[in-house]
Amino acid sequence: MVLVPDIAITFPPGARGSFLHAFLKNKIDSPEFEFIEDIPAEYKHTINPKAISKFEHRIFVSLDLQMLDVWLYLFWQKNILVDYEGYEDVFKQETFDKLYISARNLYNYCIENDLSCFNYVVPFSKIFDWKYLSNLYYTINHKLPTNKKIIVDTNKLSTKTNTACKVIKEIIRLEKLLEVDNDIFTMDMFELYKECLQNKDVKVLEKNIVKSNYIKRKYNI
């Protein structure tokens, strides 16, 4: 009798939690696999300590800066473009706003929430690391995985990104470094973004995303 591990997994949309879930439960037999079982909505994308408390293995996939652009590209293609219209053109203000706000909010969600209800926090970038995956699989299944080639090939299919997502990743990185992501940028961020797209270079961001170009947000009581 093959024991199936008792796993609950929560992850931001587009963060490949369904892939990780299927991998740990031995459900992947080809790079183009289809998800057979879905993760319950009550804890799939929302941290819900009560809903996951009964599971032995409680996993959270956390967005990290290392591959934030890869996640954002996946989220854009598999969520935004599927659920909404009008966000195809990276040179449109609406597309920039949607990508930037989505990335910033979901990244903040990962780093600002209490994750103590989980016994594994998996950085998104580590889902692409075979050694890390193999160790996690061994910890949960008490044996080593045997489908390395399939998993490596599957990961290659999900490593796409583009300049727009790289620019937004760099904006978020710089704002986090300066601790200004809750402040108001006094220049036109969209114009800086477009300049980066046109030049295919993010260097202009470091010259302009500086503390002197931000003001504190005023809150009405």
Image (tube, rainbow, N blue to C red):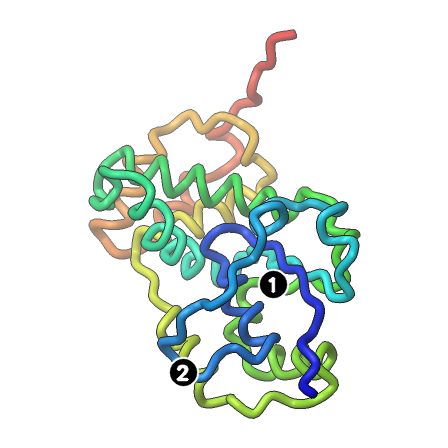
Q: Which quadrant of the rendered structure holds the C terminus?
A: top right
Label 1 sits on what residue type? Pro
Residue 123: assigned label: 1
Residue 89 in the figure: left or right of residue 162: left
SS of the residue at dot 1? strand
x then y, percent, for residue 190: 31, 35
Of 90 and 26, nearer the camera is: 26
> Height in image: 137 above or below 72?
below
Answer with mark 1 or mark 2, whichever residue precedes in sequence. Answer: 2
Quadrant in which residue 119 is drawn: bottom right
x then y, percent, for residue 24: 61, 75
Of 189 and 101, nearer the camera is: 101
x then y, percent, for residue 149: 45, 89
Residue 69 in the figure: left or right of residue 82: right
Quadrant in which residue 193 is drawn: top left
Callout 1 environment at 10 Å: few (<14), some (14 to 19), or many (20+)?
some
Of 56 and 90, nearer the camera is: 56
Please report the residue visible at 53 percent of the width from the left and 67 percent of the height from the top. 125
Label 2 sits on what residue type? Ser
> Height in image: 215 above or below 142?
above
Please report the residue visible at 56 percent of the width from the left and 48 percent of the height from the top. 41
User: Which residue is the site of mark 2?
Assistant: 30
SS of the residue at dot 2? loop
Numbered label tally? 2
Please report the residue visible at 45 percent of the width from the left and 29 percent of the height from the top. 185
